[in-house]
Amino acid sequence: MTALDGAWTRRWFEGVAAEVSRRKGELTALDRAIGDGDHGENLDRGFQAVLGKLDALDDAPTPGAVLKLVATTLISTVGGAAGPLYGTAFLKGAMAAGDRAELDAAALVEVLTAARDGIVARGKAEPNDKTMVDAWTPAVEAARSAGGDVRAALSAAAEAAAAGAVATEPLVAHKGRASYLGERAVGHRDPGAESTALLLRVAAETA
């Protein structure tokens, strides 16, 4: 595969809506251990709303148009930190995608980088703070190192995000409600990093 079009972007988020619905209990359980306990439920509400709006798109939407619709829907429907963070990520990704009809590997890296940078700017988090940045950052680096095949770049990003999510378990949290727990957060996986890994795995599977 040499490029990702709007049809893929749509399949991606249809897949995410199904997968979040299936795993919302698991995501909420992770969040219950160190956060507000609503991450899975919030994301499920947001992506079900996305699912309901995808039909309003043109027959051949650009990747940027799909990403913008996802961003605005999540911002307006998902509470807590997840809505603004993911909304910002996909809005910045949409801006990076611009009006391109397709994303090649280089453009994909631009989109992923913009999404990660949006999350960093919005949440003021850095790697090793035990947040979703710990999944996004290795994903961006892996996609950038994967070469010119867009499917290989997505697969590398997904694998790196999954490893990044696992790597949050021994960390002490420095952001969000988990930071109030100090050492008691050690041993728990960050729910935002886990949902990031889910998102990018579905992105790779639907490419």
Image (cartoon, grey):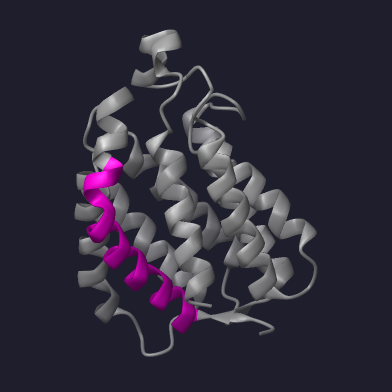
Question: Which residue is painted at 49% across and 73% down in the image?
Answer: 205
Q: Which percent across, then down, holds residue 132?
A: 49, 38
Give the main secondary structure, helix, strand or loop, of the magenta stretch.
helix
Label count reads 0
Say if the magenta span includes residue 22.
yes
Q: Quadrant of residue 28?
A: top left
Say if the magenta span includes residue 53.
no
The answer to whether residue 35 shows anywhere in this view is: no
Q: Is residue 98 left or right of residue 149?
A: left
Q: Which percent across, then down, holds residue 19?
A: 31, 63
Task: Name the quadrant of the N terminus.
Answer: bottom right
- As rendered, which of 107 and 36 lies closer to the eye? 36
The answer to whether residue 74 shows anywhere in this view is: yes
- Where 170 falls versus 179 (above or below)? below
Q: In which quarter of the image is residue 36?
A: top left
- As rendered, which of 171 and 14 lies closer to the eye? 171
Q: Is residue 142 left or right of residue 62?
A: right
Q: Which percent across, then down, holds residue 173?
A: 47, 19
- Where 41 falls versus 170 (above or below)? below
- As rendered, which of 155 and 129 lies closer to the eye? 155
Q: Which percent across, then down, holds residue 154?
A: 61, 66
The residue furthest front is 187
Question: Which residue is painted at 76% across and 63% down in the image?
Answer: 146
- As rendered, which of 171 and 149 lies closer to the eye? 171
First to last magenta residue range: 6-27
Q: Quadrant of residue 108?
A: bottom right
Question: Which residue is painted at 22% across and 32% down in the image?
Answer: 37
The residue furthest bottom is 59
Q: Is residue 136 left or right of residue 149?
A: left
Question: Which residue is painted at 27% across and 50% down in the image?
Answer: 43
